[in-house]
């Protein structure tokens, strides 16, 4: 019992991680399956056909590239504006600051059905044709909120004495931001960008309202689910997960190596 009390929290953590990664493991395993029928939901036979001919099913790669493009644009614009808003909310005091903080949370708290339908009504009233740009604009609107919250948390947790030390050493505001503030905030910005891209790439409800005839990857999966999702979808999903995992591990490795070099420079 004493051993269980000491290791209860790590055991719970491992069980939670296993629970979270079971669906991803199932998707990855079924990407090597050769289904007996239309539906790839049960293991039948090992096959590499889904990986060797990943664009063999019409619409899979085109919808995937469309979601990549929308996710990249919405993440780029949302991260840029969200970071500037976060700096403004943390570093400056102005009238309406508390109201702005409240408004930033509204897109996150609003149900996607409400947000998607309201944006659809707006685009229709403006006679704006539905398609690639309407989905991109809609994704930018809700990505900004998540970026602001993430970068704002990073800024609030940063030690202000580091910037004060840079100014004491006669660094001008531009140099302080370039060599002190921005490197410290960069992990939060990168994390916000990854979060924004995943939210944009994964979104179905808002995209379905504002896509018109455009087919994104989640919309394609929803349509294909009624007649059988091809194995290529599992292969693409597994590929995205592996690339994301590699990116996260690379960032962690670079940060840990930079931290070790900094500790050596301080102690040596």
Image: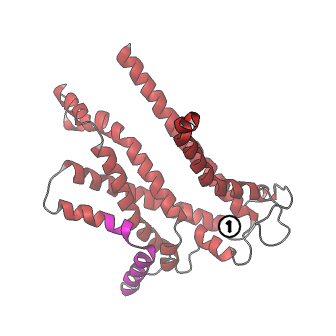
Label 1: element kind: helix
Position of 241 with respect to 85 (left or right) is right
Q: How is the image coloured?
A: secondary structure
Q: Residue furthest left?
A: 95
Residue tagged by mark 1? Answer: 60
| Start-end of magenta stretch | 105-125
The image position of residue 173, as x and y in percent, is 20, 37
Residue 115 lies within the magenta run: yes
The residue sitting at 44% across, 77% down in the picture is 116
Task: Estimate the x, y position of residue 185 in percent, counting from the top left.
Answer: 34, 42
Does residue 31 appear anywhere in the picture? no
In the rendered image, residue 240 lying in the magenta stretch gets the answer no
Q: Is residue 32 above or below residue 157?
A: below
Q: Quadrant of residue 170?
A: top left
Residue at (28, 45) in percent of width and height: 156
Depicted 65 relative to depicted 38: above or below: above
Q: Looking at the image, can residue 13 be seen?
A: yes
In the rendered view of the protein, which quadrant contains the N terminus? top right
In percent of width and height, residue 255 lies at 46, 33
Q: Out of 38 and 18, give the one closest to the viewer.
A: 18
């Amino acid at each position: 019992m004493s051993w269980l009390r000491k290791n209860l929290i790590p055991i719970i953590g491992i069980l939670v991680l296993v629970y979270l990664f079971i669906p991803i493991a199932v998707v990855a395993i079924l990407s090597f399956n050769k289904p007996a029928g239309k539906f790839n939901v049960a293991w039948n036979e090992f096959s590499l056909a889904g990986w060797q001919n990943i664009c063999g099913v019409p619409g899979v790669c085109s919808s995937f590239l469309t979601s990549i493009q929308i996710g990249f644009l919405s993440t780029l614009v949302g991260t840029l504006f969200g970071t500037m808003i976060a700096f403004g909310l943390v570093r400056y005091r102005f009238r309406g600051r508390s109201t702005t903080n409240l408004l930033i949370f509204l897109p996150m708290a609003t149900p996607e059905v409400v947000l998607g339908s309201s944006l659809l009504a707006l685009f229709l009233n403006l006679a704006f044709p539905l398609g690639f740009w309407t989905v991109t604009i809609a994704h930018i609107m809700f990505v900004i909120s998540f970026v602001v919250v993430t970068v704002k948390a990073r800024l609030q947790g940063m030690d202000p004495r580091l910037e004060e030390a840079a100014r004491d050493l006669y660094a001008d505001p531009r140099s302080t931001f370039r060599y002190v503030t921005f490197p410290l905030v960069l992990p939060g910005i990168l994390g916000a960008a990854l979060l924004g891209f995943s939210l944009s790439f994964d979104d179905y409800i808002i995209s379905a309202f504002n896509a018109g005839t455009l087919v994104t990857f989640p919309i394609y999966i929803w349509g294909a689910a009624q007649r059988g999702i091809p194995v290529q979808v599992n292969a693409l999903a597994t590929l995205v997960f592996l690339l994301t995992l590699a990116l996260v591990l690379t960032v962690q490795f670079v940060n840990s190596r930079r931290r070790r070099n900094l500790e050596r420079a301080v102690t040596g």
